Image (spheres, rainbow, N blue to C red):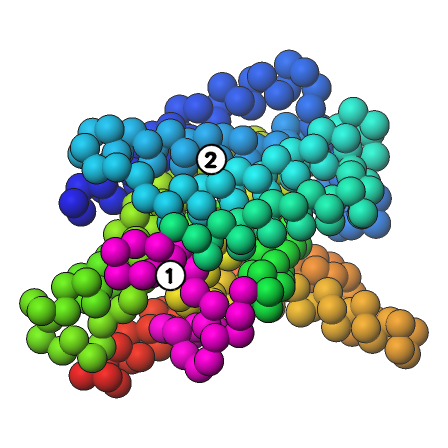
C-alpha cells in the first residue's frame, strides 16, 4: 500500500521536470508574460514578460501522478483524496481566470474582487459540503464538524459553522500562498516542505488508525481519519510536482506559478489540513505563509490607523529586499524559517500522540 506514495511522488516530480519547459515554450509563444508592479523593488523589472500561469504544470502533474499511482498499484481512489484534488483544481481554475485576464488586458488587476471572491466561495462551499458526506463503515466522513489541532477536540460546531470555518481556512491559506509568491521559488519551496510534512502525517495516521485498534499497542492514541494513507498519496504527488517545478521556478525563474498555482496550493494545504484533522496545526506547518500574511495585515492596519508604515514594503519579503538583501538571500533565509516551522509542527504532532500513550 505504501508504494502508492512513492509512485505518486516520483511521477509528480518527473512530470513537472519534463513538462514545465514545454509549458514555458507554449506560454512564451503566446506571449503570456508576467506583469510587474512599478512600485516594487527595481530588480524585479527584469522579470517583466516571464511566462506565468505555471501552476498549470504542477496541478496537472499532481492529478496525473495520483491516478497513475492508483492504476499501477491497483488501489481505488478515495473520497478524501478526490475532494482535496478537486479543491486544488477548483481554486486553480479561479486563479487561471484571474491570470488570463491580467495577461489579455495587460494590467495588474485580473478578475474583479467580487468575481474572484465569488469563485473562491463556490469552490470552497462545494468542498466543505461534500466533505461532510460519504461516511465510511466506521461513520467517518472526509471532514469533521469538530475543530482540530493534532486531532479533533471539543464539541461539534455543526455543519453551518463548519462550512464557514472551512471557507476561512481555504481563503486564508490561498491568499497566504498568493502573498508569499513574490520572489523566485519562495512559495514553491515553502509549499514543498509542508506537503512533505503532510506525507509523513498521513503515513503516521494510517499506521495508528483507529480502524486498526485491535493491532495497536495503544488504541487510546489512535486517529479517526477517513483516508489517511490516500491523503499521504495526494501530499506526496504535490510534493514531487512542486519539487520538479522548483527546478524551473528558482532564481532566475524561467516561469512563475501565477495565481493559478498559488490559489491551488493554498486550497490543497487547507484541504489536507481539514481532511487530516490538523486544522489549527497547519498555521504552524505553513508558518511562513502566516507570517507574510500578517505583515500585510499589520502594514495596512498601521497605515489606516496612524498614516505610518511599519515595513518599507509589504509583503515582508519585499521589505528585506528594499533593505539591501539579495533576492536569493531572502528566499533561502525564509526557507530556513519555513523549515523550522515544519520541524516544530511535526514535533507537536508527535507530542500529541505520545502524550496519550
Residue that appears at 21% across and 37% down: 75
User: Where is 295 relative to 125, above or below?
Assistant: below
**Residue labelled with disc 2:** 58
**Residue labelled with disc 1:** 276
Residue that appears at 73% across and 46% down: 118
Q: Is residue 30 left or right of residue 277?
A: right
Q: Earlier in the sequence, mark 1 or mark 2?
A: 2
Q: Is residue 167 left or right of residue 295?
A: left
For the magenta stretch, what is the residue range?
135-159
As drawn, which residue projects farthest toward the top?
Answer: 29
User: Where is 89 relative to 321, above or below?
Assistant: above
Residue 148 is at least partly visible in this image = yes
Residue 233 screen position, x and y as percent: 30, 45
Provide the major secondary structure of the magenta segment. loop
Q: Find out whether the residues at labels 1 and 2 contact each other: C-beta distance under 8 Å.
A: no
- Residue 198 numbered tag: none
Q: Quadrant of residue 295?
A: bottom right
Based on the picture, tell me whether residue 341 belongs to the magenta stretch.
no
Q: Which quarter shows the N terminus?
A: top left
Residue mark closest to the camera, 1 vs 2: 1
Q: Quadrant of residue 317?
A: bottom right
Residue that appears at 34% across and 51% down: 231
User: Where is 27 relative to 236, above or below?
Assistant: above
Residue 338 is at least partly visible in this image = no
Residue 172 screen position, x and y as percent: 62, 60
Within 10 Å of disc 2 (Cα), the crowding (few <14, some 14-19, many 20+) is: many
Residue 312 screen position, x and y as percent: 78, 65
Residue 205 screen position, x and y as percent: 26, 63
Amino acid at each position: 500500500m505504501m508504494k502508492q506514495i512513492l509512485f505518486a511522488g516520483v511521477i509528480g516530480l518527473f512530470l513537472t521536470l519534463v513538462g514545465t519547459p514545454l509549458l514555458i515554450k507554449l506560454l512564451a509563444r503566446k506571449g503570456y508574460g508576467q506583469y510587474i508592479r512599478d512600485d516594487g523593488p527595481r530588480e524585479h523589472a527584469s522579470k517583466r514578460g516571464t511566462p506565468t500561469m505555471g501552476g498549470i504544470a504542477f496541478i496537472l502533474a499532481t492529478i496525473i501522478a495520483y491516478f497513475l499511482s492508483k492504476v499501477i498499484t491497483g488501489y481505488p481512489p478515495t473520497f478524501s483524496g478526490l475532494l482535496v484534488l478537486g479543491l486544488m483544481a477548483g481554486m486553480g481554475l479561479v486563479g487561471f481566470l484571474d491570470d488570463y485576464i491580467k495577461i489579455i488586458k495587460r494590467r495588474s488587476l485580473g478578475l474583479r474582487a467580487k468575481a474572484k471572491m465569488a469563485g473562491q466561495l463556490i469552490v470552497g462551499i462545494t468542498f466543505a459540503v461534500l466533505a461532510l458526506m460519504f461516511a465510511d463503515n466506521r461513520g467517518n466522513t472526509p471532514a469533521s464538524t469538530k475543530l482540530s489541532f493534532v486531532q479533533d477536540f471539543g464539541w461539534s460546531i455543526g455543519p453551518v459553522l463548519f462550512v464557514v470555518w472551512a471557507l476561512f481556512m481555504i481563503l486564508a491559506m490561498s491568499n497566504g500562498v498568493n502573498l508569499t509568491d513574490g520572489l523566485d521559488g519562495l512559495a514553491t519551496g515553502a509549499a514543498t516542505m509542508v506537503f512533505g510534512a503532510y506525507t509523513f502525517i498521513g503515513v503516521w495516521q494510517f499506521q495508528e488508525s483507529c480502524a486498526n485498534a485491535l493491532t495497536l499497542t495503544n488504541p487510546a492514541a489512535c486517529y479517526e481519519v477517513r483516508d489517511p494513507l490516500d491523503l499521504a498519496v495526494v501530499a506526496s504527488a504535490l510534493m514531487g510536482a512542486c519539487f520538479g517545478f522548483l527546478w524551473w521556478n528558482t532564481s532566475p525563474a524561467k516561469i512563475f506559478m501565477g495565481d493559478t498555482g498559488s490559489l491551488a496550493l493554498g486550497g490543497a494545504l487547507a484541504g489536507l489540513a481539514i481532511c487530516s484533522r490538523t486544522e489549527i496545526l497547519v498555521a504552524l506547518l505553513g508558518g511562513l505563509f502566516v507570517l507574510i500574511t500578517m505583515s500585510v495585515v499589520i502594514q495596512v492596519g498601521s497605515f489606516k490607523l496612524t498614516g505610518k508604515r511599519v515595513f518599507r514594503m509589504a509583503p515582508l519579503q519585499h521589505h528585506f529586499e528594499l533593505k539591501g538583501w539579495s533576492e536569493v538571500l531572502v528566499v533561502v533565509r525564509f526557507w530556513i524559517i519555513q523549515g523550522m516551522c515544519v520541524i516544530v509542527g511535526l514535533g507537536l504532532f508527535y507530542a500529541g500522540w505520545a502524550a496519550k500513550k
